[in-house]
Image: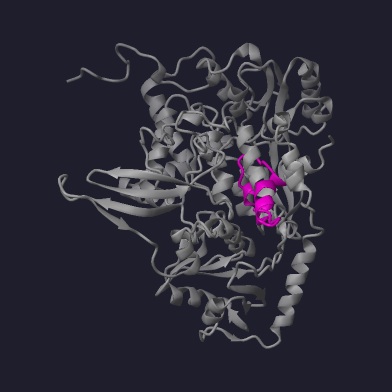
Amino acid sequence: MSQLDDLKTAIKSRLGDLECVIGWEQGYDPLHATPLFIRSEADLDRLIIGPLAVHNLATYLTGWKGKKVGVVVKGCDSKSVIELLNEKLINRDDVVIFGLCCDGVVSQRKIRAALPADPGFVESVEIGADSLKVTVAGQAATLRLDDVRADKCRVCDTPDALVSDFLIGKAHTPAPAPSLKCQDEFEAKSDAEKFAFWQETMGRCIRCYACRNACPMCVCRDYCIATSRDPLWVSQENLPSENMMFQMIHVSHLAGRCTECGECERACPVDIPLMLLRRYMNKQVRDVFQHEAGKALDQTPPLLTFKVEEERINERGW
Amino acid sequence: MEKFITKENLNRLAAELAATCRVLAPVADCGTVTFRRFQPGMVMDLHSRMAAVSPKAATFPQTETLLVVKREIPEKKPEIIETLPEGKNVVIGCRPCGARGKLIFDPVYETDKIKDPYYLQRRKNTVFISLACDRPETTCFCHSVGSGPADPSGSDVLLTLVGEGYVARSVTPEGEEIMKMALFADAGDKGKEADAKNAKAREMMGEAHDYASAPAKLLARFDDMDFWLAQSAKCISCGACTYMCPTCYCFNITDDDLGLSSQRIRTWDNCMSHTFTLEGSGHNPRSTKAHRLKNRVGHKFSYYPDLHKGVIACCGCGRCIKQCPAGVDIRQIVNAAQEYAE
């Protein structure tokens, strides 16, 4: 049986006890998937998995708190589930986790750059073992999956779900790249160059908060300090400085909690490379606290706890 | 008036107009395309893809300063300065759907009782030079909301790509004025070619969906929260759809305190946000994303048409669909209401 068949069988065995199971189905065109909320066996027929199933469905879990739901997760998504559990934002008993052994997902941005015409004109997509055959505006193109893989997949060391009730697929031996070229190149820039980059890039931000709402760990949502009007912490004026201020709030509130699922960057409708900030922050957290969010159950994020003396912060070293 | 302008000359036109006007044009912007203030030396990107954000900001900027209050010393009476928008704007290279957005604004921002001076001033001082589409995207449905890929309504000049340039047709006297510039040449018989291209683009869109029953059918689902819970399940309640939308016209007003001075700003509001219709008491009649999405869809396809002669408050540009992080498809939601078996 295929991985999809195994998954369907597993979901079918638990569907009766659950409000719904969250998976993916084909979206508005053959190149895009969309979240699917499975409530019946008829819905289950629409379930898909594979390189187009990009969404981190753990984002929805806090919205179902108190109800029993199932969720299909890739390795990276499972880290978000672990982090939500560790922070007691969801109850383990309320969630049935259908974990996948994942072969990686695509970056729609990379596909767009690689196609001979805008992906909006897509006519058909054939998903092969290591390629995508896409026909756009009458022109066929074969893209190597390796070339259009999401950045997070290149450095992924957790392709198989770390927490699950059902683990589906063949286990991987991950071979992550040590780092990402785009990150290394950005960090090698001078402060002035970085400042100019963000000044320019944040001019494009429309403050739609897609990055915030797509984030599985951004759980304040309706009560975010960036949209509070009393007190008014951040002006509603759409200036690069205010937009950057919001991003800084987002990044610092995720210090030690971000699992690098990349949903913020994927959700951005104007292609702002937000992961540059996240990865940098995570590196600091790794260096100082030797902590990686979502890697193990029963960890407490370093900034949600207190130690009289941190091992790597030399407070009284004068 | 019908003329022809080469691709190079259209870029020159943008540069020449930029000397006296604020020109907004689509430019390649780190892998995407956005409307940016055009400066001589820039190259427009008219064809690689539809701009991510609509050209709405030309007539309805994301931030508009309504007034400024200045006080030099605390004892002195503050000075209140009104800040009506000045100068002319030209949008070049938007699609017909983007230019049509303001037609949805007009009946709201200019009524017998209320006239919005900021919007009206920009509206009067902005010229739209649109480019007809030659191929629909999977998310396009302009033909189903009373428009089409070469719809001139809302534009001042409509361009159609023919060979290495564009057949330009004036739609308004303001458009005709611009077309008197020497950069425009005689169109010869290229007009026929333009007509054929426009007809082909319309044909590629296929049959239009009939939204005639949508206002009543959506209203019939108003109290059916199960319907809206199911429809909104995947929505993450962000503002990408509203901010991308050419027709979303809701705004918020904030007094920004800047020490001894302050400014009153109007910013785009977003009906998918928790703070939208949040009352002073802390109560919000639209307390969940299901309520909010019901309002968003209902407003465009039911309440607005009921108030404004059946006109659907949507241009069918598809931005809300393709830019949605979760792939929420407004067409699917309206269809579900239309096809709902009682």
Residue B22: image quadrant is bottom left
In reply to whether residue B320 is colored magenta, the answer given is yes
Query: Whole-percent x and y of residue B297?
Result: 66, 43
Q: Is residue A276 left or right of residue A42?
A: left
Q: Is residue A264 visible?
A: yes
Q: Locate the C terminus of chain B by quadrant.
A: top right
Q: Is residue B148 left or right of residue B118?
A: right
The mark total stands at 0
Q: Is residue B203 left or right of residue B80?
A: right
Query: Whole-percent x and y of residue A221?
Result: 50, 30
Q: Locate the N terminus of chain B by quadrant.
A: bottom right
What range is drawn magenta here?
B302-331
Query: Whole-percent x and y of residue A41?
Result: 83, 25
- Which SS does the magenta portion mostly show? loop
The residue drawn where x is 66% and y is 41% is B327
Q: Is residue A123 above or below residue B91?
A: above
Q: Is residue A27 visible?
A: no
Query: Whole-percent x and y of residue B167?
Result: 64, 79
In reply to whether residue A39 is colored magenta, the answer given is no
Which is more toward the observer, A241 or B126? Answer: B126
Q: Residue placed farthest to the front in the image?
A: B113
The residue drawn where x is 50% and y is 54% is B30
The residue drawn where x is 59% and y is 48% is A109
Which is more toward the observer, B329 or A59? Answer: B329
